[in-house]
Amino acid sequence: MADSWQTFPLEFKGGLLKNISPLQQGINAPGSATVLQNFEPSIEGGYRKIEGFSKADDNALLGSGNVRGLKRFGGAIIASRGTQLYRSSGSGWTQISNSLSFPASTATAKVNGATSSTTTLVVDNNTGTIKVGMIVTGTGISTVTAKVNGATSDADALVVDNNVGTIAVGMTVTGTNIDGTVTVDSLSNQNNLVLSSNQTLPDNTDLTFSVTVSTVTDQNNLALSNAQSLSNNVDLTFTEKSPNLSGSGKVRFAEYNFTGTDKLFIVDGNGKPYIFTGTSLAQQTSLASDFAGADFVTVHLERLFVAIGTTIICSGAASSSSDNFSGSTSFEFDGTITDIITFREQLIVFSQNGIKKLTGKTNSDFAILPITDDVGAIASDTVQEVGGDVMFLAADGLRLLGATERIGDFSLAVVSKSIQPEFSKFTANSTSFSSLTIREKSQYRIFGYNAGFTDDSALGIIGTQFASQGGEGMAWAETRGINSFAATSSYDSETEFIYFANDDGYVYRLESGNSFDGDNISATYQSPFFPVNDPRIRKTFYKLILYTEPTGSVTTDVSLKLDFEKDLDFQPASISFSSIAEGTFFYNDSSALFAQTGLVNNGSGYSASATSIAVDTLTITSSSGLTIGDTFIIGTTTHTLTNAPTISGSAGSASSSDFSFTPGLAGTTADNTEIFFTKINGVGATSYGSANTQSQFESQLVGSGFTAALRITSEDTNPAFSLDSATLEYTTNERR
């Protein structure tokens, strides 16, 4: 005879586990996950559906290939694609190296006395500053063009045709796909040349060969790269060649301010570094050849540290204009450096097989000490500080480098053992990686990249650090659908900006909106099979109660799985739970007016270049009390109304806007994104909620088995919600 109904509580915690047997997991960690995709272990408890992403700028960067690097600087996004650097504040990309907003410097002068077939040039009537490397134009100055005759691939030999003018040794070569500063080293004839560096150039690429300034004795006495015949008083223009990034790998940045000006130090893994001041971009051509090919840069002790191969070069003291590396010092390491990071007043240097630290504060007391010679970071762009420790990708998984209580000592621990099978597949299928931290969530995210990945197939791993579990207390989950080649996160004022990009040319802002740039977010949680006290007694299940923490409407499907799904013909049907947010209120003030959730109704969504957000599907019929200074909430971010909206049209109608207002937002907001309005009629509150937002779902069940599991899925653009807990009501049958 069956016993009376009993209750089995299930608390969702523990994250993804893949390293213990199924039954053991169900007994000891029933609220953990065997599948946790696009749900994140939350420091506030439970599993939360992840936030979406949207385009940080509705325009793609020019060029082709991957976006090579990202950095937020000066209130804008800095991005690299191809050989160019761009910036955006959300309404269009500006090419930094060649745009009118960031012009290369120019100068003018007149020929002072005729020249005849000589490189020596005397000028007067100067404006601006003439510099070595400037391109010279004017009547009589050689102007030469040609086309590539047959594609070249990583070669310095070049064949050209369709020549106009005479090509000479020393001329600077420019054109599409020319990488770096390139000159003519030698030529057999006008169609067969040797360049100063290897180039990859498609057939029929247009090339320009220019005369440049080779020496500046003073502003009136110059030497040109090629002999010229010029008449007296000819007007000459000197233009500084806009620098182009070189190579095709990652571009990395370090922000610093040593002398009162915010700057970016930029390395591209191939040429010499660059400095961007916000108004100008300049390659540091005066640096020694040792700097060519710098891969990494960081700021430590108010100095710049640059890594090239097996070498670290540090700049001089901050007081000595250290970004030009006057008084620099270099250090050699055993293996090729894969990353560098400042951690607890020490510079940590990673190679594939070892980790070292640079201690000291001056050139006289700098010392290199080993941390380990057995473990290193096997991939670049995986090193991040999270929760007071340093996470990195090692050969055996993700590890934490943490300082111990012993001064100057470190601990090393593999923290991804619980997901090792999934992690091995993740690393095996990826050719490169990017990573970032979401500080507000104590989260580390790593994304694998492969040129063959589609957006839907792209995988990532989330690690949430829980202080209550100690420094190594990580709970794991997976992402699917975030295809990232380059990623970054940082604070600007009090807002955390999180970006990623790939080869489609767009830069996306993570933690933005409820969709993947308009597409549904598909999220799945599955528990282990738990025996409900005894794995050899059959249970009959009658009722499920699911507890959630919503921020808006919720739609989810819940399936009860039985006995490891061995008999697929007799599995219970899934249950659909749905709730629509219908009214909101202030906690502790039920009399306060509160506008209901509205939806963005701009057709294609709101962009930062738009003048207003149109809102529809409101239940209120008057704008009374909705004033400047009231707040509105999109997702989890609160903003302030800058003008008082006026309702027009029919409240609650999806076909017309109830009102519109100027939000003053950066970035984009997808169409049909929910908006909550608060602080109506001057009533303030620090917390708010939805009066009719359902958080508890109940359903009858039909099913019987020895073990059971829950599978919960959500695929929509509703706001994020958290899975808190569940209860199953059941009876037991007699033991067999």
Image: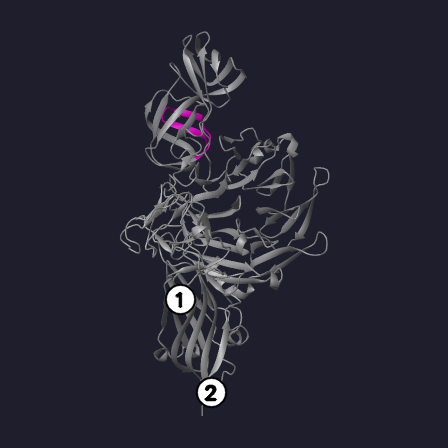
Q: Which residues are magenta?
A: 180-198
- How was this image coloured? one colour
In the picture, the disc for residue 4 is 2
- Asked whether 654 or 316 is in front, the reply is 654
**As drawn, 368 above or below 292:** below
**As drawn, 35 above or below 614:** below
Mark 2 is on which residue type? Ser
Is 542 one of the magenta-colored residues?
no
Q: Are marks 1 and 2 in contact (CB under 8 Å)?
A: no
Q: Residue furthest left?
A: 655
- Give me the residue at 42% from left, 18% from top: 237
> Where in the figure is residue 659, as x and y percent of width and height?
33, 48
> Where in the figure is residue 494, as x and y percent of width and height?
53, 46
Is 182 one of the magenta-colored residues?
yes
**Is disc 1 placed on a helix, strand or loop?**
strand
- Asked whether 723 or 108 is in front, the reply is 723
**As drawn, 726 above or below 245:** below
Mark 1, other Cα within 10 Å: few <14 / some 14–19 / many ≥20: many
The answer to whether residue 484 shows anywhere in this view is: no
- Asked whether 376 or 505 is in front, the reply is 505
> Where in the figure is residue 67, as x and y percent of width and height?
43, 44
Of the two numbered discs 1 and 2 on the same chain, state the one appearing first in sequence: 2
Residue that mark 1 sits on? 713
